[in-house]
Amino acid sequence: MRYLSDQMLLEVYRRAVSLQLESDFINLIYEELVRRSLVDALVTA
């Protein structure tokens, strides 16, 4: 996941949630958002 830009990672997370993909996959993306301190960007976007 280190190769995805922050913007792309946010988009991947939003799409994964909207498509109701596996919760493990969504959690993995979310953990990376936390690591990058991007969780606030989910709320403001």
Image (cartoon, helix red, strand yellow):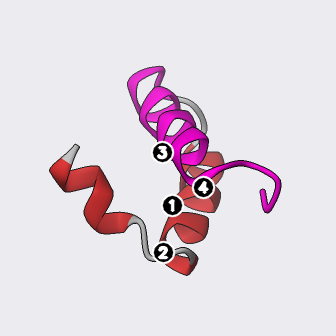
In front: mark 1 or mark 3?
A: 3
Alpha carbon separation for disc pair 4 and 3: 9 Å
On the image, numbered disc 2 is attached to which residue? 34
Alpha carbon separation for disc pair 2 and 3: 11 Å
On the image, numbered disc 4 is attached to which residue? 29
Which dot marks residue 10? 3
Q: Is residue 37 left or right of residue 40?
A: right
Q: Amino acid at mark 4?
A: Ile
On the image, numbered disc 1 is attached to which residue? 30
Q: Residues within 10 Å of mark 4 (few under 14, many from 20)?
A: some
Specify start and end residues of the magenta stretch as a single range.
1-20
Q: Residue at x 52, y 32 (%)?
A: 16
User: Mark 3: which secondary structure?
Assistant: helix
Residue 28 falls in image quadrant: bottom right
Q: Residue at x 78, y 56 (%)?
A: 1
Q: Amino acid at mark 3?
A: Leu
Where, quadrant-wise, is the C terminus in this rendering? Answer: top left
Q: Earlier in the sequence, mark 4 or mark 2?
A: 4
Alpha carbon separation for disc pair 2 and 1: 6 Å
Q: Return the residue nearer the eye: 23 or 31.
A: 31
User: Mark 4: which secondary structure?
Assistant: helix
Q: Residues within 10 Å of mark 2 (few under 14, many from 20)?
A: few
Q: Earlier in the sequence, mark 1 or mark 3?
A: 3
